[in-house]
Image (spheres, rainbow, N blue to C red):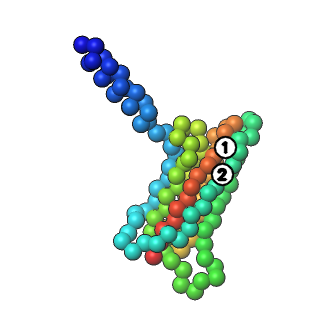
Amino acid sequence: MKSFFVLIFLALIAFVAAKDDRHNLILGERQEYDRLLKTKVVSSKAVVLCTKTEDYTYKHEDIEDPATITFVGVIDQYTNGKGGYATLKRGGPDYTFITLRFTSQRNRGYHFVIDIYGQ
């Protein structure tokens, strides 16, 4: 009986440890011949009693035939649910550009890793 309670306790600890409250944004789908177009880290420190908003734009103006975006992964580095939020503002998969908006929670910062793939 004692081992049963130990097993239940360990399962509960594993469940709590596996909980992940990230605010990820996944757009599109990886395809067979995709290549990594850009990796970018976007972050901002907390400001007392405020939220912070920032836009990030990826585009190739100097290339005649730019790659078409197929997949965008925006991964929140805060796993406790206290990170910011990423939203698509314009562009994205099936376009050659993307603009993402990052917004922090009040009194919090944010830290995201952006991976953009395309063909």
Q: Is residue 6 above or below residue 117?
A: above
Q: Residue furthest left?
A: 1
Is the Cβ of the residue at disc 2 closer than 8 Å to that at disc 1?
Answer: yes
Q: Residue furthest top?
A: 1
Residue 43: assigned label: 2
Residue 90 visible, this angle = no
Q: How crowded is mark 1: few (under 14 residues within 10 Å), some or many (20 or more)?
A: many
Residue 44 horizontal side relative to residue 72, left or right: right
Q: In this view, does 16 lie above or below 77?
A: above
Depth check: give the residue in front, 12 or 57.
12
Q: Where is residue 75 in the image (x, y as percent from the top left)?
A: 52, 52
Q: Position of residue 33 (x, y in %)?
A: 39, 74
Query: Label 2 to label 1, Cα distance in Å?
Result: 7 Å
Q: Residues within 10 Å of mark 2 (few under 14, many from 20)?
A: some
Q: Residue furthest right?
A: 48
Q: Quadrant of residue 66?
A: bottom right
Q: In which quarter of the image is residue 16?
A: top left
User: Residue type at mark 2?
Assistant: Ser
Q: Position of residue 92 (x, y in %)?
A: 51, 66
User: Residue type at mark 1?
Assistant: Gly
Which residue is label 1 attached to? 109
Q: In this view, does 33 lie above or below 115?
A: below
| Residue at image point 44% right, 33% down | 17
